[in-house]
Image: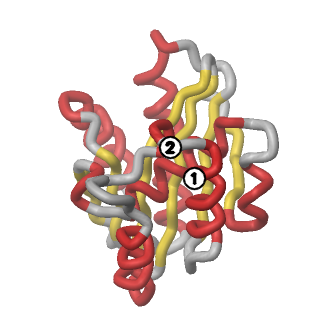
Amino acid sequence: MHVFVDESRRRSTYLLASVRVMPAHLTAVRKVVRGALLGSQRRIHFVDERVDRRRQLLDLFCGLPLGVVAYRSVHAPTRQEPAVRSALLVVMVDDIVGEGATRLVLESREGRDQLDRRVIHRRLLPQTDSALTYEHLRPTEDPILWVADAFAWAAGAGADWPGRCGEVLRVMDVEP
């Protein structure tokens, strides 16, 4: 299983959405997601899309062979974001290692990626039997990161957005 991760923040709520895709489905999922680009778009960034387009994209993504777990902390002031992100990463890494994930791809946040690498490395160190590799990529490098962006946005948006995803999206509250 490959896991693709992006973040979202809504006021004091911080989320990491993890999209899980089996290797046999990666090519097909990427093709469908790339096919959703409009005109000169280089990537899909959910915050930049119109409401009707968000609905259309989310419906499309919910029909793909994937699963999503959004790890959420509801009391996460901006000044505590690094600690909150680290706590969510620890829970997520434990989950995906337990599920047999072999690859973790996080959307790069440029100069802040080093903290993620330290947290993940420390978590994997005692798990000598884990086959998990991890890396940071820019959003234009893998379209499945756009899917993670969409689900992170939807999980944090409230209203009917998370419910549109049915059983594809599970939100898990984590308190650091």
Say how many tags the image has. 2
Measured along the vertical axis of the image, is residue 81 above or below residue 43?
above
Residue on which the image places disc 2: 49
Percent x, y for residue 132?
Answer: 34, 66
CA gap between label 1 and label 2 equals 6 Å
Please tell me how crowded label 2 is: few (under 14), some (14-19), or many (20+) other residues with Cα within 10 Å: few
Query: Residue at position x 41%, y 84% from top?
Result: 28
Query: Mark 1: which secondary structure?
Result: helix
Query: Mark 2: which secondary structure?
Result: loop
Measured along the vertical axis of the image, is residue 84 above or below residue 55?
above
Q: Is residue 8 visible?
A: yes
In this view, the residue farthest toward the bottom is: 24
Query: Residue at position x 34%, y 68% from top?
Result: 103
Identify residue type, mark 1: Arg
Identify residue type, mark 2: Glu
In the rendered view of the protein, which quadrant contains the N terminus?
bottom left
Residue on which the image places disc 1: 53
In this view, the residue farthest toward the left is: 111
Q: Nearer the viewer, residue 56 or 128?
A: 56
Percent x, y for residue 21?
Answer: 48, 74
Measured along the vertical axis of the image, is residue 44 above or below residue 79?
below
Picture quadrant where residue 50 is located: top right
Q: Is residue 24 left or right of residue 10?
A: left
In the rendered view of the protein, which quadrant contains the C terminus?
top right
In this view, the residue farthest toward the front is: 39
In this view, the residue farthest toward the top is: 79
Dots 1, 2 in contact, CB < 8 A: yes
Q: Which mark is residue 86?
A: none
